[in-house]
Amino acid sequence: MNDKILISNFIIAARIGIFEEEKKTPQRIRIHCTIELTPRARQGKDDIGDTVRYDTVRQNIIDYLTGGHTELLETAAENIARICLADKRAASALVRVEKLDIFADCDVGVEIFRRQNI
């Protein structure tokens, strides 16, 4: 098992959904990302240059989600997974995206797993 980078319980307002109101008004979504590192990443070194930077991943997710409208939660999860895998030291990404305000009694969402295309 390889080391992992975690981004958990990241809540952001995004324009996402197929309904007209969702296209006009941002809604809260929660994001969880688990990025598995390749065996070559870090290797016990205490150097930020040898690992995937969670601050960069987080900022790229913000830029994507605040940059326009996305119809499907599945599409958002796919694009977030691509962001997580942009660094070649990321071997795989498990991404969960949840809409928090659709139902009063539960959150709804999607979860996907993607591997690096090498």
Image (tube, grey):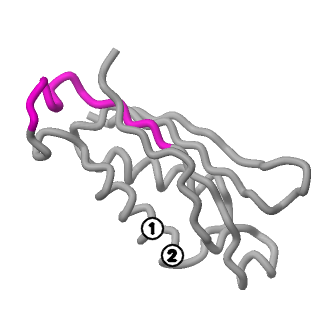
Residue 115 lies, in percent from the top left, at: 39, 32
Amino acid under label 1? Ile
Count of numbered labels shown in the rendering: 2
Q: Which residue is mark 2?
A: 66
The type of residue carrying mark 2 is: Thr
Q: Secondary structure at mark 2?
A: loop
Left-right relation of 72 to 106 = left
Which quarter of the rendered picture does the C terminus lie within?
Answer: top left
Using the image, determine if residue 36 lies above or below residue 27. Answer: above
In which quadrant will I find the N terminus? top left
Tell me where residue 5 appears, x and y as whole percent: 35, 37
- Checking the image for residue 94, the label placed there is none
How far, Cα to Cα, is label 2 from label 1?
6 Å
Where are the magenta residues, as a range? 33-46
User: What residue is pinned by disc 1?
Assistant: 62
Question: What residue is at 15 percent from the left and 31 percent from the top?
Answer: 42
